[in-house]
Amino acid sequence: MDDVDTLKAQIKTASTRAIDAKMNLHDLSEELPVNWEKIPEIAQAATDAYKRLSDLKSRLAALSV
C-alpha cells in the first residue's frame, strides 16, 4: 500500500516533469516546420508524463476514500 506522503512527493515530481514536457511540446510547435520530425517523440513524452501524473493522482484519491 502506498504512503500518502510518498505519493504526494511523487505527484510533485511528476507534475514538474509534466509541465516540462508540455513546454517542450509548446516550444516545438512554435518552431514548426523546423524539427517537425520530433513531433511523435515529444508528444509521446508529454503523453507519458501526464499519464504518470494522472495515475499517481488516482492512487492518492483511492487512499483518501
Image (cartoon, rainbow, N blue to C red):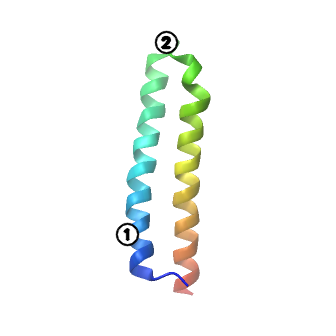
- Amino acid type at mark 1: Ala
Residue pictured at 55% horizontal, 24% vertical: 38
Q: Which residue is mark 2?
A: 34
Distance between the alpha carbons at the discs numbered 1 and 2:
37 Å
- Amino acid type at mark 2: Val
Q: Position of residue 19 (x, y in %)?
A: 41, 46
Left or right side of 43 for 29: left
Residue 46 badge: none
Residue pictured at 58% horizontal, 32% vertical: 41
**Quick one: label 2, few (<14), some, or many (20+) residues within 10 Å?**
few
Identify the element where label 1 is drawn: helix
| Picture quadrant of residue 14 | bottom left
Q: Residue furthest front?
A: 1
Q: Which residue is mark 1?
A: 9
Residue pictured at 53% horizontal, 12% vertical: 33
Q: Quadrant of the N terminus?
A: bottom right
| Picture quadrant of residue 43 | top right
Q: Position of residue 36 (x, y in %)?
A: 56, 17
Sequence-wise, the earlier of marks 1 and 2 is: 1
* Above/below status of 10 relative to 2: above
Identify the element where label 2 is drawn: loop
Please count the marks in the image.
2
Q: Position of residue 61 (x, y in %)?
A: 54, 77
